[in-house]
Image (cartoon, grey):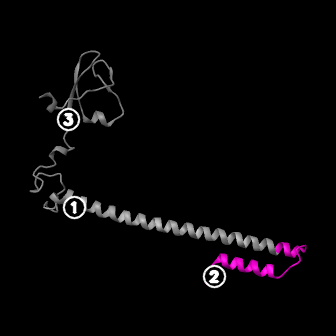
Amino acid sequence: MMTITEKAAYIKGLVDGLELDESAKETKVIKALVDIIDDMALSLADAEDDIAVLADEIDDIEEHLDAVDKDLSDVEDIVFEEYDEFDDECDFDCDSCEGCDGLYDEYDDDEDYEYEVECPDCGEVFVFDDSAFETDDPLTCPNCGFVIDEIEIEDEEDED
């Protein structure tokens, strides 16, 4: 079976073998068409080569992706191995599960914290809770209305 470039060359040879009158308008049109066919065949051959290279690169990427997927699966097995013994009903945020034993208590987001702040302007000490961080409103002193730009929060563990 002939390739497209071989077929284009064959047609060009047939036209050259006809020994057409070079001054005739029809000959000029036929030769221009043959040149276009030849250019298209070469472009198509280049595109086929590019596609073959891309297909090889895709195969390589798929192999790497499979390896990464296997490695990630191994990591997941190692990381989550200790949790396999947990009860299927465990939501990792409970005190009733034997597997947890309060393991995730430190991450309890339901606990409300209160903070004491001394106003740098009037010296008044006031208390606010976590909800103050959930808004874009600035923290203001309830006594004098001073806007407090920076708050330094110390952990209880840091104070010991």
Give the main secondary structure of the magenta stretch. Answer: helix
Secondary structure under the numbered disc 3 in the rendered image: loop
The amino acid pointed to by label 1 is Asp
Contact (Cβ within 8 Å) of mark 2 with mark 3: no
Query: Horizontal and vertical percent for residue 78?
Result: 20, 59
Q: Is residue 5 above or below residue 134?
A: below
Give the residue drawn at x 86%, y 76%.
Answer: 26
Task: Find disc 1 in the rendering and name its residue.
Answer: 77
- Taking the image as shown, residue 80 lies to the left or right of residue 54, namely left
Tell me which label, 1 or 3, sits earlier in the chain.
1
The answer to which quarter of the image holds residue 114 is: top left
Judged by depth in the image, the label closer to the viewer, 1 or 3, is 1
x and y percentages locating residue 41 in the rendered image: 67, 72
User: For the point 24% across and 58% down, which residue is it?
Assistant: 75
Q: Which mark is residue 2?
A: 2
Is 55 left or right of 74, judged from the image as shown? right
Q: Tell me where residue 133 appears, x and y as whole percent.
A: 30, 34
Query: What's the CA distance linking mark 1 and mark 3?
Result: 36 Å
Q: Nearer the viewer, mark 2 or mark 3?
A: 2
* Disc 1 secondary structure class: helix
Residue where numbered disc 3 is placed = 113
Percent of width and height locating residue 58 = 45, 66
Label 1 – label 2 distance at C-alpha:
54 Å
Name the residue at the bottom extreme. 1
| Amino acid, disc 2 | Met
